Amino acid sequence: VRPVLFATPAPKTVIVTHHKPDADALGSSLGLYHYLKLKGIDAQVISPTDYGDFLFWMPSNEAVMNFEENPEEAIRLVEAADLVFCLDFNSLKRINTLGEHVANSKAQKVLIDHHQDPENFDDYRLWTTATSSTCELIFDFIVLMGDRNLINKQIADCLYAGTMTDTGSFRFDSTKPSTHRMVADLIEAGALPHLIHDYIFDNYSLNRTRFLGYCLNEKLELIPEYNTAIITINAQELKKYHIITGDTEGFVNFGLTIKGVRLAVLIVDRTVKVKLSFRSKGDFPTNEFSSKYFSGGGHFHASGGESTLSLEETREKVKKHLPEYKHLLTD
Ligand code: 5GP
Ligand code: MN
């Protein structure tokens, strides 16, 4: 990709990431954005949708274009681009209708991602599931370009954030020695772990905290037979607690904090469709389950999907298919 990237004049470059970007999606995009800037490339970051305000602190957040707010401009940029980076997603479906424009763009496409079975829409690829995060792959990319010494505080803050969240604060089994070595470099370059942790995890509204309490108290259903915990949230509850984008992020993980639980499910009625999140420990393949039954996908231990059934029917569908996996959910 080097001849395309460092051609003169500089290629018109767009960076896209998945809808409702999380810290890995946005951190990898902005980390790459800052690196390209140092190399004389003024890239445009496009998010298919809005995202949670706990990410607004990221350096150059204000430069991110929201496709839903600026569809014509975003499409024009994608169509005119020489180079499109596709970060932290494996399927064009994950960037909504922006996907058609990326598919049809004459630009060279560079996929940098860590999700299983990527579609074939790219020209260049830095891909493996054996990494902690797309942020770690951006770090690898910069190192491969021979530019490790260019990693500054802005890049380091962005890459630290996404690695921290995608590894569950460095506790999932995706956390490798290379992850900690990279993090050491990022801290040396100026990333401040305690502040980034604070921005992301200690930055909730009172409503969100109370709503979490309500969900754990009233909405969590434990199914001991399958070591499964399910939280179901309906549209009225979202409204009553003034829940906004990003507020339910992380709720699903609480199911897994219960002793013995191997599968945690969060089901939220997002009005147009019902959204599901799955997290597991051990041998339960959440991505297989979500792709088989909920048109979704993701990683082995963390994935998501959707459903056009009602909220109740969706929950019943999850429960109906648990027996097929009993051997993986129990001893
Ligand atoms: P979350 O539960 O936090 O929304 O998503 C967890 C992981 O599952 C994400 O990293 C993403 O890769 C994947 N994921 C979530 N929703 C979907 C979906 O609707 N389709 C696919 N293919 N993957 C999803
Ligand atoms: Mn990721």
Image (cartoon, helix red, strand yellow):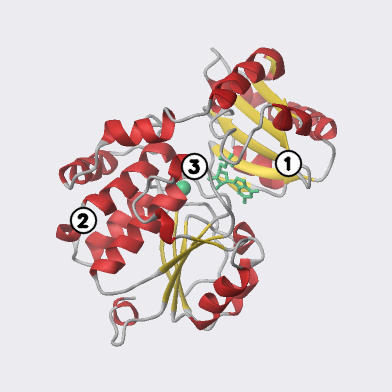
User: How far separated are the C-alphas under marks 2 and 3?
Assistant: 25 Å
Residue 294 found in image quarter: top right
Along the line of sight, the residue nearer the viewer: 258 or 199: 199
Residue at 60%, 64% (x, y): give it.
Answer: 92
**Label placed on residue 270:** 1
Residue 101 found in image quarter: bottom right
* Foreground: disc 1 or disc 3: 3
The residue type indicated by label 1 comes to Arg
Q: Where is residue 201 in the image (x, y as percent from the top left)?
A: 43, 30
User: How far separated are the C-alphas under marks 2 and 1?
Assistant: 39 Å
Judge left or right: residue 121 versus residue 2: right
Identify the element where label 1 is drawn: loop
User: How far separated are the C-alphas under marks 1 and 3?
Assistant: 19 Å
- Count of marks overlaid on the render: 3
Along the line of sight, the residue nearer the viewer: 238 or 248: 238
Along the line of sight, the residue nearer the viewer: 282 or 36: 36
- Residue tagged 3: 53
Judge left or right: residue 111 versus residue 288: left
Along the line of sight, the residue nearer the viewer: 233 or 129: 233
- Residue tagged 2: 151
First-in-chain label (2 vs 3): 3
Q: Where is residue 66 in the image (x, y as percent from the top left)?
A: 55, 60
The C terminus, quarter of image: top right
Identify the element where label 3 is drawn: helix
Residue 41, above or below 164: below
